[in-house]
Image (tube, rainbow, N blue to C red):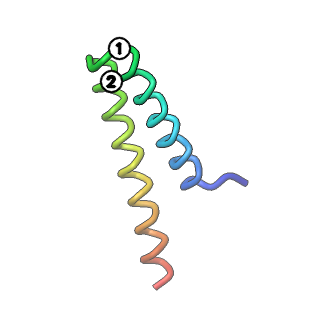
Amino acid sequence: MIAYRDTLNALAFAFTIFLIVYALQKGMDETELVVNVLYFTVLLLSQIENLREVISKS
């Protein structure tokens, strides 16, 4: 079974690859801004999930 954290990490990786490819092809515009916001939201959610795991273990 795929865990919530694994899904968030996979999404963050996919957004990272997309940003690299997109930046190499086009440069920055509204699309990259939206993807950056989504990317950092996913990173924030994954860090919150990691903190929950650490707090629940202690």
Residue matched to label 2: 32
Q: Quadrant of the C terminus?
A: bottom left
Q: Is residue 56 above or below residue 9?
A: below
Pair 1/2: label in front: 1
| CA distance for labels 1 and 2 | 9 Å
Residue 5 left/right relative to 38: right
Secondary-structure class at tag 2: helix
Q: Position of residue 7 (x, y in %)?
A: 57, 47
Q: Secondary structure at mark 1?
A: loop
Please say if the residues under marks 1 and 2 sit with CB atoms less than 8 Å apart. yes
Q: Which residue: 45% across, 61% down?
A: 49
Q: Residue 26: which numbered mark, if any?
A: 1
- The residue at 35%/43% (across/down) is 41
Q: Of the residues shown, which amino acid type is indicated by label 2?
A: Glu
Residue 43 coordinates in the image, percent (x, y)? 39, 49
- In the image, residue 50 sits, relative to residue 6, either above or below, namely below
